[in-house]
Image (cartoon, coloured by chain):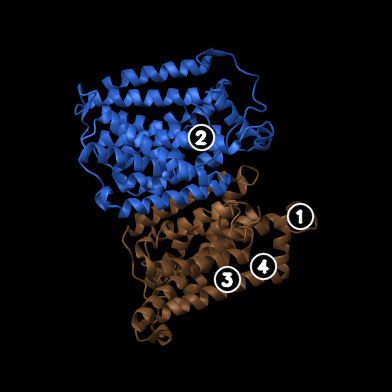
Amino acid sequence: MAEGSLVAGTVGAPAVEKEAVFGFTRAQATAFLVLVAFVVVSPFFLYPVFLMKVLCFGLFACAFNLLIGYVGLLSFGHAAYFGMGAYVTGYAAKAWGVPPEFAILMGGATGALLGLPFGWLAIRRAGIYFAMITLALAQMVYFFALQAPFTGGEDGIQAIPRGTLFGVFDLTSDFTMYWLVAAVFLAGFLLIHRIVHSPFGQVMKAIRDNEPRATSLGYRADDYKLMAFVLSATLAGIAGGTKALVFNIATLTDVHWAMSGEVVLMSLVGGLGTVFGPVVGAAVIITMQNYLAEFGAWVLVIQGGIFIACVLAFRRGVVGEIGHALKVKL
Amino acid sequence: MLEDLLFNLQLVALGISNGAFYAMLSLGLAVIFGMLNVINFAHGAQFMMGAFVAWLLLTQLGIGYWPSLLLSPLIVGLVGVAMERLMIARLYKLDHLYGLLLTFGCALVIEGLFRNIFGSSGQRYSAPREFQALDLEFGDFFMPGYRVWVLIAGTTICIATWLVIEKTKVGSYLRAAVERPQLVQAFGINVPLMMTLTYGAGVALAALAGVLAAPVYSVHPAMGANFIITVFAVVVIGGMGSILGAIVTGFLLGFVQGVTDVVYSEASQTVVFVIMAIVLLTRPAGLFGRA
């Protein structure tokens, strides 16, 4: 892959690193254990609602990163899948009394159903066209959400009940809810890891690095891109649905283009194409938003400033820089 | 029956005058993309800046509409030149997507700053009275004079830009530099300077559209962001290959939006995106694009 491209390909990278366990390299396995330890221990020290927000957005950013990091496609419209996932989960839980586990799955299904036609259209172009098309399609979803009766227009869907998980665990307690969110996050994270290290994932990376060559080897590049797109949209829908249950609300903010920009920013700050970067980026951005909430529109200026700084001087992101310093892939 | 027809005709005419804005903005995007290979995400923010500068000139310095048509694009264009020199010029050797991300960041900064200073609510900017002389009225058909002016001015600006690029010597340098930048540089033409000026000119074009739009829409910090996404869809439909294509597609989609407003007004905001989907299915490179 040419120098200066968005995500480092395998070309020119150090020879295949030894896989320690379950497809992780040694460094990655260590990082993963640190991540799991953090997820398990942190609710005893930090505010669970804040942590749940980080995990929901972490999963959302990982879903986005699956597309840019492993297929090389930059989607600027991921808010559509996240936001519609939130709406459907919220509506199902509130209007139909669907239990939380199924409501979240319905959010994921919404992401998939939306991702299939949108992905099918968008993969006809690559690069900046792909970004513009996904953004435009997401804007269409935004207008739909603004006008459709079930989304509640400007008010959104409010007072979404968290319900009772498997009919046993009452989720109104933040602490109980946290374990569900943590489980969803870790399952999503491991699923992405599994996808990337499957034969399917290898073909995805081959297409990212050299599409004509992958095609000449007999792989239908478009089928793989579409699969990756739908998987990414599904996980974004699950993240959105989970978020709707955590905060009891699904609003137009979730489908707005600014949300699409936010998930790009999270992945960029953490490190595009790294395994752990999106999660770190989500934690950084959410923390920043919490501290800056009282400053109103300055958040926008600071987010824009971080975008500019990352692109000009910090293209590897936090995790990418750490990996580069330690000479490992994280 | 005739009254209905005239009223519907009025909606279509308003649509076409909206198309003038699409045409000017997608033209600016196409010019910048052709030369710099950067999709200027800040185009909407620069459009908004153009409108705001005109409003500021009027309220702070008492400078009216006509001088603003020249001053505002000049000021915003200079800001664009600074942006290109300080930031965008560092990215030419990198993946084009970085240009998109950088200008997206710039758009957020600009919009955030204006929101902090002027608040989110809209400011009124009235058109000069003399435009009332252009009012078109037959029975139920009424088109405000200012809208007529937007249509005339927009068409003139687009044609003038096209003539500069296709028929002048500067334009021929530009077209050559788009095709083979190294070769043109070898002939002794300062290509980096040309890129800076091209970006500045594209930005000035956005600001000019902003001044024209100020009396039509209320002047507020989010006015550009809402516009630019629709213009992106217009650009995808037209394909960025040709300058004329950008202009024609802009007007065409304004017309289609006007017609949709008559037939099924709920869809008038989404029709552009639906057409984009249809074009992607049938001609992925866009109506005027080269594959």
Instruction: Report which residue position mark 1 lands on.
Output: B185
Q: Is residue A45 something one can see in this rendering?
A: no
Q: CA distance from mark 3 to mark 2?
A: 42 Å
Q: Residue at x 61, y 46 (%)?
A: B90
Q: Residues within 10 Å of mark 2 (few under 14, many from 20)?
A: some
Q: CA distance from mark 1 to mark 4?
A: 18 Å
Question: Is residue A273 placed above or below B189 in the rendered structure?
Answer: above
Is disc 2 placed on a helix, strand or loop?
A: helix
Q: Residues within 10 Å of mark 1 (few under 14, many from 20)?
A: few
In the depicted view, which residue is nearer to us: A207 or B77?
Answer: A207
Question: Is residue B286 placed above or below B151 in the rendered structure?
Answer: above
Q: Residue at x 50, y 50 (%)?
A: A133
User: Do the residues under discs 2 and 4 have CB atoms within 8 angstroms?
Assistant: no
Q: Colour of chain B?
A: brown
Q: What's the mark number on residue B165? A: 4
User: Any idea which chain is the blue one in this picture?
Assistant: A
Q: What's the mark number on residue B79? A: none
Instruction: Report which residue position mark 2 lands on.
Output: A227
Q: Residues within 10 Å of mark 4 (few under 14, many from 20)?
A: some
Q: Earlier in the sequence, mark 4 or mark 3?
A: 3
Q: CA distance from mark 3 to mark 1?
A: 28 Å
**Callouts 3 and 1 on one subunit:** yes
Q: Residue at x 57, y 23 (%)?
A: A199
Question: Is residue A202 placed above or below A118 in the rendered structure?
Answer: above
Q: Determine the chain carrying the residue at label 2.
A: A
Instruction: Report which residue position mark 3 lands on.
Output: B158
| Tag nearer the camera, 3 or 2 | 2
Q: CA distance from mark 2 to mark 1?
A: 44 Å
The answer to which image quadrant residue B242 occupies is: bottom right
Q: Amino acid under label 3?
A: Cys
Q: Residue at x 48, y 16 (%)?
A: A29
Q: Amino acid under label 1?
A: Gln
